Image: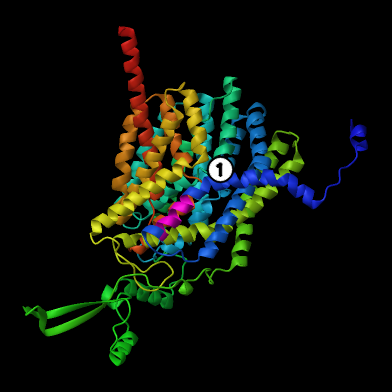
Amino acid sequence: MEAIKNTLPKIKMTWKERLTILKPYLGDRIYEQIKNVWLIITYLILFQLIILRLPIVDSIMIAVGIAIVLFGLMLFMEGLTLGLMPFGETIGATLPQKAGLIIILSFAFMLGLGATFAEPAIATLQLAGRYIEPDSAPLLYSLLNEFAGQLVIAVGVGVGIAVIFGVLRFLYSWSLKVLIYPLVILLTFFTVFANFNEALNPVIGLAWDCGAVTTGPVTVPLVLALGIGVSRIVSGSSGGTGFGIVTLASLFPIIAVFSLAFGHLGLDDYYGRPNSKLKFDKQAASAHVALSEEKNKPKELAETGYSFEDFEKFRKSGKVPAGSELSFKGDMKLDEGKIIIDNASIIVKKRYGFRAKMSDLRFWDDALDFFEKLKDSLIGAARAILPLCLLLFLVLRGILREKIKGSDEIAIGIFFALIGMSLFMLGIFLALEPLGSQVGQNISSSFTAIKPYGALGMHGPLFENKFIGQIAVILFGFALGYSATLAEPALNALGATVEKITIGSFRKSLLMQSVAAGVGIGIAAGVAKLVFDLPLSWMLLPPYMILLVLTFISSEDFVNFAWDSAGVTTGPITVPLVLAMGLGIGQSIGALEGFGVLAMASVFPILTVLIVGKLVQQSESSETEEEVEA
């Protein structure tokens, strides 16, 4: 065979011919990524341009960043398919046959930890620290800045423990309900305790949001491959669909982040505390105080009013400055068709409104060093991808003694994943984070006057009635969550699986609408939390208490896919955009932090799916009773 192979003539192809062959393949992959992201990005851009009537600042940078995100995601997903998934599938199928329980569980933990580092959305957490004012939320500030590395490790440890319990659940056929009850009760206790602690309270949103960051395109396929492999060996069948691990990988990281926060609270080593390693910088502290004072100035003394220079120009020229509105005070009477004002005072006020010309807007953030960000992205991607690949390789060759099939393809896949993740992280810096922050900061102009993102002057409020403006922002959140969820490809796959499991009683379209409505309600609730400055614990705990009741009275199948449905809503595009948007809203209205939107977007889909599931079951029972009576 080898001799025949050597005698075959090599086909020589020009670069043009090679590109002609690759063009349809690459076109399909790029089109697939465009389908995943176009709706949410278009919605955000059009909302700012048409509803808020504000231009997109750094528009060329954002456009370039979106293109980089699309190309990076295409390479990354292709790299996962070619490079990491074959590792995961082979190990998942053979490890349970050749290794003992201790080795399986050790690998499960390391896999969960390594997969978390490789999640594209985890990089978003590292950008969130700059939105937090250290004096207002010192522990949260330290977790996102000084202890950022520990935070990511804590999230990874949480996922690792979740994978261990997921494997044990497959091995011993545990009900998912048995794991959900103690986890939710423990998280309730942590949340209530943190709610009444001044330092811990701002951490609640971060902890719950971290549960949504973990269930992405790397973690879910790898841990499912292991879990289904174990189940296949134990049951001797196809092993089911692997429901449950995604739920555990969402809950355990929340516990891990709370535990990290409790630890630093006990050590008293966060910002401003006696054991903190951060040196107190008087000059920086004075600048921070000055900035806070400037932000809290009455509007007539800040950008909303005229400067002394404006006043001098008006005094010399006598011309009312453009963009002004006049009002009069004094005794007013009507005399022979004339309005006469005695002792008149003319008040000239700067009218709200964004007046910058397009030529005044920047199209690229000059403060952003493109090549420095590219270098940081490459280093970050290497740290995330290469250790995971090394772990998979060592287990496959060192423990399982399995040969690596298709090593050329795997090497190319790892290279694609590395470059793809680097580009995606760069795209977060260039596009996703700036766009989400921009819309988040500017959307507050619906109900209050704000300084628009990256611009001078004031804008808003769009609605004279503040409450109506706040409701408009909440409706924006619902529409964003609903439309973005329906565009998630993972939801399509989940819907098909659920329809198959329930033998058509829970239709794919019904599940998709239930999840999308849940995410829409969740994001709307998260935005309401920010707009009305509501405690997150008040909004999170009641839905989870209802969930415990619904979980108890629902069948195992419905519980499994309902709780996992929250995981499909947090894709690599949605997480950075929604997280940045929430932080932007919080920053524009002066909130301590802007976390919690992702947490709310995770709980309500479970609620809506379980409620619809109960209605479906009751409908089936009623039909069965009618058939029996007939």
Magenta stretch bounds = 40-49
**Which secondary structure type mostly characterizes the magenta part of the structure?**
helix
Q: Position of residue 262 (x, y in %)?
A: 40, 51
Which image quadrant: the C terminus? Answer: top left
Q: Is residue 544 left or right of residue 166?
A: left
Please report the residue visible at 31 percent of the width from the left and 37 percent of the height from the top. 545
* Residue 511 located within the stretch drawn in magenta: no
Residue at image mark 1: 217
Q: Residue at x 45, y 40 (%)?
A: 486
Q: What is the quadrant of residue 625 in the picture?
A: top left
Please report the residue visible at 67 percent of the width from the left and 46 percent of the height from the top: 26
Q: Which quadrant of the rendered structure holds the N terminus? A: top right
Give x and y (percent) for residue 210. Answer: 45, 48
The amino acid beneath tag 1 is Pro
**Residue 409 vertical position relative to residue 280 in the rendered view, above or below:** above
Rendered location of residue 266, percent (x, y): 39, 55
Q: Nearer the viewer, residue 384 or 492?
A: 492
43 falls in the magenta region: yes
